[in-house]
Amino acid sequence: MIMKKILALFVVLFLALCGLQAQVVYSCDYKYEADVKVYVTQYKYEADLVVYKCPYKYEATDNKGLWYFTNYKYEAKKKIYFTDYKYDADLVIYFSDYKYEAGWKKKEKMHLMY
C-alpha cells in the first residue's frame, strides 16, 4: 500500500515538472511556422525580455526568460522566428551571459510566452 502511494507521488511530481517547462523553444526557419516573432537587440534597455540560454532542459522552467533551445519542433513549448527588423517583432529580447539577469522588463508582453 505504501509503495503505491510513493509511486503515485513520483508520477504526480514528474508530470508537474514536465508542465513547468514553459521556456523550451524551437527556432523556426520560416515566419509562418512561429508562435512568436523575436528581434534580438544589442542593448538591454531596449528589451522586453532578458533571456539566458540554459545549457540543460530542466533549467528552463516557468516564464522567467530562461530558455532552452531544442533541435526538435515537437519538444518545444514555443516556436520562435528571429526577425531582422524590430518593427516586425512581437517580442524584443536581449541575450545575457548571466542567469541572474534573466527576466521580464515589460510584463505586458508576458502572455506571448505562455
Image (cartoon, helix red, strand yellow):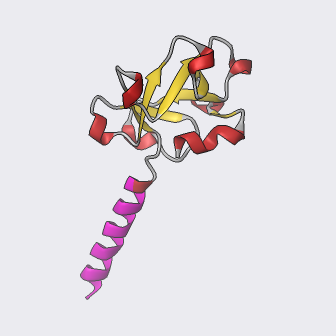
How many discs mark residues in the rendered view?
0
* Whether residue 53 is situated above or below residue 76 in the rendered picture: above
Query: For residue 61: magenta?
Result: no
Visible residue check, residue 97 = no
Residue 76 x %, y %: 36, 39
Residue 69 x %, y %: 39, 29
Outermost bottom residue: 1
* Residue 2 falls in image quadrant: bottom left
Q: Residue at image x 57%, y 19%? A: 88
Visible residue check, residue 106 = yes
Residue 57 x %, y %: 38, 38
Q: Residue at image x 37%, y 54%? A: 18
- Give the camera-side residue of 62 and 41: 41
Quarter of the image for the N terminus: give it. bottom left
Q: Residue at image x 71%, y 19%? A: 46
Magenta-colored span: 1-18
* Whether residue 65 is situated above or below residue 22 in the rendered picture: above
* Residue 81 falls in image quadrant: top left
Outermost right residue: 45
Q: Residue at image x 59%, y 28%? A: 91
* Residue 39 falls in image quadrant: top right
* Whether residue 97 is situated above or below residue 112 in the rendered picture: above
- Classified by dominant secondary structure, the portion drawn in magenta counts as helix
Outermost front residue: 32
Query: For residue 8: magenta?
Result: yes
Residue 72 x %, y %: 27, 33
* Whether residue 85 is situated above or below residue 92 in the rendered picture: above
- Give the camera-side residue of 90 and 99: 90
